[in-house]
Image: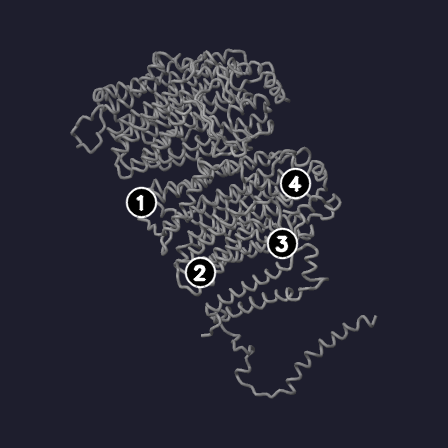
């Protein structure tokens, strides 16, 4: 365990300690508890920043050669779980490991999680009145969960964290949410659980395939990738496992017909819950696709890509259209998430460096901008106790600072050049067009998808700007302020407090930073994504020659032979061992 | 064990010292209770007896193999520890009801049932096994009846009594066929005979081994409350107290699964072709019926009864996988599925016992918690009890990082690891993948009603102040279960999965058939369904 | 052929004559003094025509069960008592066949059994089953 690894572990364990402390402070009152929670999230953020700052750049002068560590990984910690297999000294047959580390794919998502947690504590500052100690304990528990998901190097550990995030969110939505919180919490939990249990079976099937080939049960993601590269699965098996993984990840993303839990959960959740759901938890689905489906089941992924892309496209346009017709601000932003995540999937399933880089960057961007937007809606709701767009107008006069932030996050969300959204969307759209125009088995339909997806960008600008225009500009129309003000007093509500500005500022910093200098972020992701993209890219190329569609009778055999020729490097192209 | 040792030897009998201590404690409590009038002392005596038995068990070596009718092996050792630890939980949970009524009778019967469970764990012989199963059942009837005056509890006791008798009879009938085929009641001998018999002799038996297997399965399915032999469980649990329901939900299930593993999978590999089909069918039906029916329950004990039925289905997944793996191909590991079942027993037992303990604590001797609705707002009024109950519910639902997750993991892993051998039974793998998928979907369905309990506690406003007068003893019992669930979930899960697999592997009475024999069996006539 | 059927014939004969004798004997020999009590079907005094749900003393049950327990379980001691030192069929043969490893275990086993019966006896006695209050 190097020192960075130790810090990584500390950043994940620390919120757990904080959760215990907060939960124990039953008598302290919320003033103390929220400060404790803020201290813990800040500390975790500092630790996370220390870890992220160690991320190696694309060109590493001295690629390390460490047994059991891919060259693009850093901050690796590898401990045995509960002493399994340690006693005899030889590897246990059932070797689950407490193995953590980051690579180019996870590093920014990990950082984003630590950042958004601070924001969510700050936006809950005044909002959470009831049982504050439990609220902050659950929030910190959730932080452990999400940081762990992105840092897990062991398949089971990933799944443990993945499922574990459901428990705190279930309570956060169900206890502190709005009117329909009970139903929303149940639906959210059950929807996600049902899908992820099938994912679980798929992951186990991968492990067992590896076991049947190598004779050792390992849950290490790296070892599994290497094992699958050495002993590729038959295409038929890959499809089944891809479907199983798809069930869980597609619900999480969410892809089009499986998205119905999302608006409900987002709208009913307390502000912090919405920020985290949109900002982090949706990313786990896309992350799962890149972490497991793409490298481990390349044939099935490539074969199913048009299908995934089509439903991603439907999600983009459908989400945008539904968002356009919403009268509730929070619902509008929730549906915009469906649209935006569709873009991310588009980039990821373009299978080229630009698209995947853009897709992953867009995941981070969406976390920043939509997280910020949800926080803003929460702040507005605290002031007026309504989210009805029709009841508001010209609020920029009353709340100029608020309006500034809303416009900024909106512009980021619709991809104004100079802000983060532009960098991500541009990259992934270029990637998608490249894929569409490249010779490949699905040539023209992919180009159509790329072309049609651009309408999503236009619609996105429309509904977001329309929202801003209706609420912020025009004649002043204010809903009755909250906190029992007299009916006709028109006592002006106060603009954003310093605390609220602090909650949003870090997001703004990154929005501008990514917008101005995306290369800083991309060079750190490319170490992982470029090799993956190029191996998939090559595979798509070969798949064209041994076309899946052209060989109806024995496409299984065709794909398998392809897999043998085109050995996919588990850990990565140019730097790979 | 020394192969030249006598069938019944002093050394073999002395292996049962822990059980003797427990039975001795029971006798002491029964007889002593007629002299001393103390109500509270007997639980202490029982606890001391269990502690002494634990000490005796601790000092025992695990030689492996058989000492006459007693299977002194790692599986027995593991299961005895499980029963003994659960026994501690039971004694604590029943301390209060015992003190309120006929303390010596309750405590003594409980100790006898625990001793029965421990003997089942080490039974390597059919007669001993049957007697041990009855040693669990008969005191249980007493426990169900003693000290309860209302008609519901009488109905519950009578129902349990008659169905238990019926199940015992069916089991015994199956044992008879097994004896008739092999000419021995000794499991090691049965396994040897069944494996070394020529093809012609196998044909001679006709369907008898399969018949024996079916009858034993049916009889023991009653004990573990597997559908379609489950229907007594909800009525019985509803009619009795939380403490009794805890005993009923856990102890017969441990004994039933232990007996199934010992008699069917380990000793009757020849009938595995029938075995995995029965177990798979029962597993699918039981899981689905249990979970689907549990969705509509308003009474907590009824809900947990259906939950325990569903879990019987999960337990059978491991058995089915273990059966199928004995058929091979080369490299299949029966211990994976059987170990998963044993491990799941541990997980299930502590989660369920904990849930019942928490519910018992929340009631009072006069009025216990009956409906889910009574738990409303518990997160506010009784935060610690509510948190504990929530942990048990999440563990039963199989959500990580709690114990139930590792249980589900090991079961699904074993089901997915079943491979087809070429030729006959090629569709086996497909069946087990379907089983795993049904199991996973069932787990999601099950989460619905577990979550409903949690949601009621945390999301609804308090209905009325719960009494929470169950007493310190049952609270300690719940606390022990909580520690077990969290410890297994966070730390010991993988290690215990490995340990139970190793234990089962070390406990097969005869080594698995060689490939040559396997081929021979594969060519067996169709009466032995593969 | 007749030889082999003779026992059956004898059996039929006895089976026919015995009931006839039993029916005729009292008719000829017995004094006839009819009272209401004597006319009842059950000499124990139970009225055969009444509500089947009639309560009846639980002490009968206790006594019956106690009788059953001790009577049946003591039966177990007969084979033990008979099977001592008999080289062709008893305990010694079991030892010789390596079924048990010595005579001691049989003795101890029976003593434990008697001890358990004794405990049960003390229990029922202290519970007052034998007192007909």
Q: Mark 1 and mark 3 in contact? Answer it, CB < 8 Å.
A: no
- 3D distance between C-alphas at marks 2 and 3: 33 Å
Classed neighbour count for the residue bearing mark 1: other residues with Cα under 10 Å, few (<14), some (14–19), many (≥20): some
Point out the tag, 1 or 4, that comes first from the N-terminus: 1
Is B163 placed above or below A466 here? below
Which chain is home to disc 1?
B
Q: How many marks?
A: 4
Point out the tag, 1 or 3, that comes first from the N-terminus: 3
- Name the residue that disc number 3 marks: B9
Which quarter of the rendered picture does the N terminus of chain A lie within?
Answer: top left
Residues at marks 3 and 4, common chain?
Answer: yes
Q: Nearer the viewer, mark 3 or mark 4?
A: 3
Tell me the element at label 2.
helix
- 3D distance between C-alphas at marks 1 and 3: 58 Å
Q: Residue at x 37, y 37 (%)?
A: A183
Q: Nearer the viewer, mark 1 or mark 2?
A: 2
- 3D distance between C-alphas at marks 1 and 2: 35 Å
- Name the residue that disc number 2 marks: B104
Which chain is home to disc 2?
B
As rendered, which of C35 and A216 lies closer to the eye?
A216
- Name the residue that disc number 1 marks: B381
As rendered, which of A30 and A556 lies closer to the eye?
A30
Tell me the element at label 3.
loop
Classed neighbour count for the residue bearing mark 3: other residues with Cα under 10 Å, few (<14), some (14–19), many (≥20): some
Point out the tag, 2 or 3, that comes first from the N-terminus: 3
The image quadrant that residue A404 belongs to is top left
Q: Residue at x 33, y 26 (%)?
A: A43
- Name the residue that disc number 4 marks: B511
Residues at marks 1 and 2, common chain?
Answer: yes
Instruction: Give coordinates of residue A347: x percent, y percent.
Output: 45, 17
Q: Nearer the viewer, mark 1 or mark 3?
A: 3
As rendered, which of B334 and B491 lies closer to the eye?
B491
């Amino acid at each position: 365990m190097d020192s960075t690894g130790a810090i990584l572990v500390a950043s994940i364990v620390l919120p757990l300690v904080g959760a215990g402390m907060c939960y124990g402070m039953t008598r302290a009152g919320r003033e103390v508890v929220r400060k404790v929670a803020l201290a813990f999230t800040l500390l975790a953020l500092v630790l996370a920043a220390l870890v992220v700052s160690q991320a190696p750049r694309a060109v590493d002068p001295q690629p390390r050669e460490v047994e059991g560590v891919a060259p693009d990984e850093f901050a690796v910690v590898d401990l045995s779980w509960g002493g399994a297999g340690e006693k005899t000294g030889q590897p246990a047959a059932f070797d689950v490991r407490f193995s953590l580390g980051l690579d180019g794919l996870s590093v920014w998502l990990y950082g984003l999680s630590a950042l958004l947690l601070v924001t969510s504590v700050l936006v809950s500052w005044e909002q959470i009145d009831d049982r504050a100690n439990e609220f902050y304990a659950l929030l910190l528990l959730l932080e452990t969960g999400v940081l762990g998901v992105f840092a897990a190097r062991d398949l089971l550990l990933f799944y443990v964290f993945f499922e574990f995030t459901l428990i705190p969110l279930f309570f956060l939505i169900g206890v502190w949410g709005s009117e329909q919180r009970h139903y929303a919490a149940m639906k959210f939990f059950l929807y996600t659980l049902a899908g992820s249990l099938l994912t679980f079976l798929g992951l186990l099937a991968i492990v067992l395939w590896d076991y049947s080939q190598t004779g050792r049960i390992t849950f290490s993601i790296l070892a599994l990738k290497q094992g699958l590269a050495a002993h590729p699965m038959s295409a038929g098996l890959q499809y089944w496992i891809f479907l199983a993984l798809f069930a869980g990840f597609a619900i999480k993303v969410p892809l089009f017909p499986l998205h119905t839990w999302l608006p409900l959960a987002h709208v009913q959740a307390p502000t912090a819950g919405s920020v985290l759901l949109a900002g982090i938890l949706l990313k786990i689905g896309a992350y799962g696709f890149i972490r497991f489906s793409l490298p481990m089941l390349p044939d099935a992924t490539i074969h199913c890509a048009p299908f995934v892309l089509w439903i991603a496209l439907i999600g983009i346009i459908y989400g945008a259209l539904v968002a356009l017709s919403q009268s509730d601000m929070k619902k509008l932003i929730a549906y915009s998430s469906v649209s935006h995540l569709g873009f991310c999937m588009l980039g990821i399933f373009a299978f080229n460096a630009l698209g995947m880089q853009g897709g992953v960057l867009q995941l981070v961007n969406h976390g920043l901008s939509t997280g910020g937007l949800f926080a803003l809606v929460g702040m507005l709701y605290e002031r007026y106790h309504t989210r009805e767009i029709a009841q508001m107008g010209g609020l920029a006069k009353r709340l100029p600072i608020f309006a500034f932030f809303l416009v900024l996050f909106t512009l980021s969300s619709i991809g104004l050049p100079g802000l983060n959204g532009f960098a991500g969307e541009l990259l992934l759209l270029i990637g998608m067009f490249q894929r569409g125009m490249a010779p490949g088995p699905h040539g023209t339909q992919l180009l159509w998808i790329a072309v049609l997806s651009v309408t999503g960008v236009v619609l996105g600008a429309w509904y977001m700007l329309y929202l801003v225009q209706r609420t912020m500009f025009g004649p002043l129309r204010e809903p009755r302020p909250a906190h029992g003000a007299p009916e006709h007093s028109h006592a002006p509500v106060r603009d954003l407090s310093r605390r609220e500005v602090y909650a949003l500022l870090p997001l703004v910093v990154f929005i501008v930073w990514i917008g101005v200098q995306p290369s800083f972020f991309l060079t750190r992701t490319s170490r992982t994504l470029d090799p993956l993209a190029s191996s998939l890219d090559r595979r798509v190329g070969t798949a064209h020659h041994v076309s899946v569609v052209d060989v109806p009778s024995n496409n299984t055999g065709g794909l398998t032979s392809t897999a043998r020729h085109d050995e996919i490097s588990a850990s990565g192209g140019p730097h790979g061992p | 064990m020394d192969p030249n040792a006598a069938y019944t030897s002093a050394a073999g009998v002395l292996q049962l010292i822990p059980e003797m201590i427990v039975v001795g404690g029971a006798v002491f409590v029964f007889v002593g209770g007629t002299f001393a009038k103390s109500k509270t002392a007997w639980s202490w005596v029982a606890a001391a007896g269990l502690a002494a038995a634990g000490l005796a068990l601790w000092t025992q070596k695990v030689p492996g193999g058989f000492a006459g009718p007693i299977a002194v092996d790692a599986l027995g050792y593991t299961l005895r520890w499980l029963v003994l630890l659960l026994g501690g939980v039971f004694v604590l949970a029943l301390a209060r009801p015992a003190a309120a009524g006929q303390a010596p009778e309750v405590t003594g019967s409980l100790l006898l049932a625990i001793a029965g469970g421990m003997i089942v764990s080490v039974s390597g012989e059919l007669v001993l096994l049957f007697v041990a199963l009855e040693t669990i059942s008969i005191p249980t009837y007493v426990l169900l009846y003693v000290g309860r005056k209302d008609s519901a509890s009488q109905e519950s006791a009578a129902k349990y009594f008659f169905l238990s008798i019926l199940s015992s009879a069916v089991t015994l009938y199956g044992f008879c066929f097994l004896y008739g085929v092999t000419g021995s009641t000794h499991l090691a001998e049965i396994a040897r005979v069944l494996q070394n018999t020529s093809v012609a002799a196998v044909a001679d038996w006709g369907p008898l081994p399969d018949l024996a297997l079916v009858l034993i399965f049916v009889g023991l399915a009653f004990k573990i409350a597997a559908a379609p032999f489950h229907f007594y469980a909800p009525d019985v649990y509803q009619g009795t107290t939380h403490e009794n329901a805890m005993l009923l939900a856990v102890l017969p299930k441990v004994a039933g699964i232990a007996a199934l593993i010992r008699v069917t999978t380990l000793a009757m590999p020849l009938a595995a072709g029938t075995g995995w089909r029965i177990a798979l069918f029962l597993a699918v039906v039981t899981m689905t019926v249990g979970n689907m029916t549990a969705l509509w329950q308003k009474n907590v004990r009824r809900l947990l009864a259906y939950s325990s039925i569903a879990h019987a289905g999960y337990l059978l997944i491991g058995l089915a996988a273990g059966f199928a793996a004995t058929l091979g191909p080369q490299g299949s590991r029966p211990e994976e599925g059987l170990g998963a079942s044993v491990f799941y027993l541990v997980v299930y037992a502590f989660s369920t016992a904990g849930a019942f303990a928490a519910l018992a604590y929340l009631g009072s001797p006069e009025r216990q918690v009956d409906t889910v609705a009574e738990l409303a707002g518990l997160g506010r009024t009784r935060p610690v009890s509510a948190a504990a109950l929530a942990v048990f519910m999440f563990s039963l639902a199989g959500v990580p990082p709690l114990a139930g997750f590792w249980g589900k993991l090991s079961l699904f892993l074993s089901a997915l690891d079943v491979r087809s051998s070429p030729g006959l039974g090629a569709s086996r793998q497909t069946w087990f993948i379907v089983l795993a998928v049904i199991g996973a979907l069932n787990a999601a369905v099950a989460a619905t009603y577990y979550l409903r309990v949690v949601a009621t506690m945390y999301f609804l406003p308090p209905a009325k102040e719960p009494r929470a007068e169950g007493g310190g003893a049952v609270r300690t019992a719940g606390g022990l279960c909580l520690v077990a669930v969290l410890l297994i979930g966070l730390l010991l899960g993988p290690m215990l999965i490995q340990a139970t697999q190793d234990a089962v592997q070390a406990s097969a009475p005869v080594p698995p058939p060689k490939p040559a024999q396997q081929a021979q069996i594969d060519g067996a006539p169709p009466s032995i369904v593969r | 052929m007749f030889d082999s059927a003779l026992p059956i014939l004898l059996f039929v004969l006895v089976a026919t004559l015995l009931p006839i004798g039993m029916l005729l004997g009292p008719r000829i020999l017995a004094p006839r003094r009819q009272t209401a009590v004597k006319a009842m079907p059950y000499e124990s005094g139970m009225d055969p025509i009444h509500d089947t749900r009639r309560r009846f003393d639980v002490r009968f049950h206790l006594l019956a069960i106690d009788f059953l327990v001790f009577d049946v379980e003591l039966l177990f001691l007969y084979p033990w008592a008979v099977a001592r030192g008999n080289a062709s069929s008893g305990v010694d043969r079991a030892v010789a066949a390596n079924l048990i490893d010595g005579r001691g275990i049989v003795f101890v086993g029976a003593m434990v059994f008697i001890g358990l019966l004794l405990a049960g006896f003390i229990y029922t006695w202290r519970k007052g089953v034998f007192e007909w209050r």
